[in-house]
Image: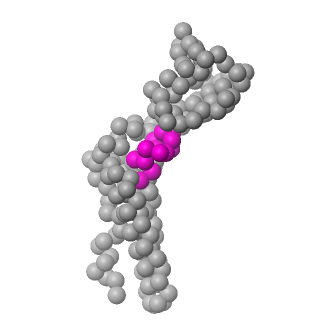
Amino acid sequence: MWHALILALILCPEEPQLPSKACPEAWQALKDIALVMEVVGPHENWATDFASELRYVRRYWRLLRDAPPLADCHWLPPPSLAREMCCFNETHQAHLQMQRMIYVHRCNQLSEMIAETRQLYQVWECVRRANSPNESWALRRRMLQRLRESIGEEAYYANKLPCWVPWWHFQQMP
């Protein structure tokens, strides 16, 4: 019964007015449903205010309705590898910034390369955070959603990630 009531409160179009205290059965039902909806993971902490936690679950359930499930993380590289790719990308961005200061006549071209490198960094940052077990489930699913939007559905569902830096520019660099 508690599960049906809590589910109805989550799905209700209007935000219900609830007290901050609730019985243990209501709390357990909220936690169970949030887990199944992939909004809050078992490793995440809960506040003691039932009404605010219900608002959190309602908000993120609506926000993540179209987000990919956490199961999509299985094809992503491990967070340690993604972190290394992000570090390499940052180092490359710093190199390009230095090149832009040295080769002023190539400022526009190098600015475009920096912009492209930053876009790839954003992709790999999404990969890193989506596959990080320490992040909240809501954030991980938002990162999967952002990743899918940034690389496109076709590449996302084909499990194809772009390179972490625009390697095609390496031949052009002085």
Please give the name of the residue rendered at 44% of the width and 39% of the height, measured from the top-left corner. Answer: 67
**Which residue extends farthest top?**
1
Q: Is residue 90 left or right of residue 59?
A: left
**Placement of 160 over or under 43, stated as above or below:** below
Point out the stretch of residues depicted in magenta: 128-142
Please give the name of the residue rendered at 40% of the width and 59% of the height, measured from the top-left corner. Answer: 83
The x, y position of residue 1, in whole percent, is 54, 9
Which one is nearer the viewer's eye here, 122 or 50? 50
Please give the name of the residue rendered at 31% of the width and 82% of the height, measured from the top-left corner. Answer: 172
| Main secondary structure along the magenta-highlighted residues | helix
**Placement of 34 over or under 110, stated as above or below:** above
Which one is nearer the viewer's eye here, 102 or 91? 91
Which one is nearer the viewer's eye here, 129 or 168? 129
The x, y position of residue 3, in whole percent, is 53, 15
Quarter residue 59 falls in: top right
**Count of labels shown?**
0
Please give the name of the residue rendered at 43% of the width and 79% of the height, measured from the top-left corner. Answer: 95
Q: Is residue 172 left or right of residue 146?
A: left
**Placement of 67 over or under 21, stated as above or below:** below
Asked if residue 135 lies in the magenta stretch, the reply is yes
User: Does the image show residue 27?
Assistant: yes
The x, y position of residue 71, in whole percent, is 35, 37
Quarter residue 90 falls in: bottom left
Asked if residue 92 lies in the magenta stretch, the reply is no
Quarter residue 105 falls in: bottom left
